[in-house]
Image: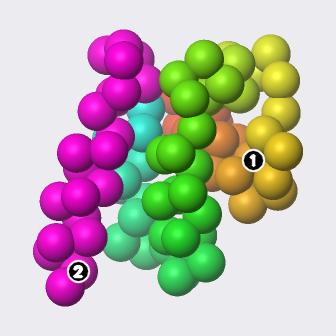
Amino acid sequence: MEEARIKRLRWRTRRGTRELDALFGGWLDERFADADEAQRQAFDELLDVQDPDLWDWVMGHARAPRADWQAIIDDIRARHRL
């Protein structure tokens, strides 16, 4: 079951730009396994957001409307020094 979930998420991290692909795919590779179930669910739901919003959040132009999403965005930003 977990392998199927990872494959589905891997597909969903393929976004409209290479930058978003790398940022969200990287979080999946490096953080997902150690995340608790609430973080995993938040990441899954975060991938439903449109690319322009994700980009604005990752670049720091806006904040995500949910604290759990913002925590993931903050982690991505910190890892990549954005």
Please tell me in which quadrant of the rendered image residue 79 appears.
Answer: top right
In the rendered view, tell whether residue 2 sits above or below residue 73: below
Q: Amino acid at mark 2?
A: Glu
Q: CA distance from mark 1 to mark 2?
A: 24 Å
Q: Amino acid at mark 1?
A: Gln
Quadrant occupied by the N terminus: bottom left
Give the residue displayed 36% in from the left and 27% down from the top: 15
Q: Which residues are magenta?
A: 1-22
Q: Position of residue 61 (x, y in %)?
A: 80, 16
Q: Position of residue 56 (x, y in %)?
A: 70, 19
Please tell me in which quadrant of the rendered image residue 50 appears.
Answer: top right
Give the residue displayed 43% in from the left and 24% down from the top: 20
Task: Identify the mark at residue 70; answer none if there is no mark.
Answer: 1
51 horizontally vs 3: left or right: right
| SS category of the residue bearing label 2 | helix
Residue marked by disc 2: 2
Give the residue displayed 40% in from the left and 64% down from the top: 32
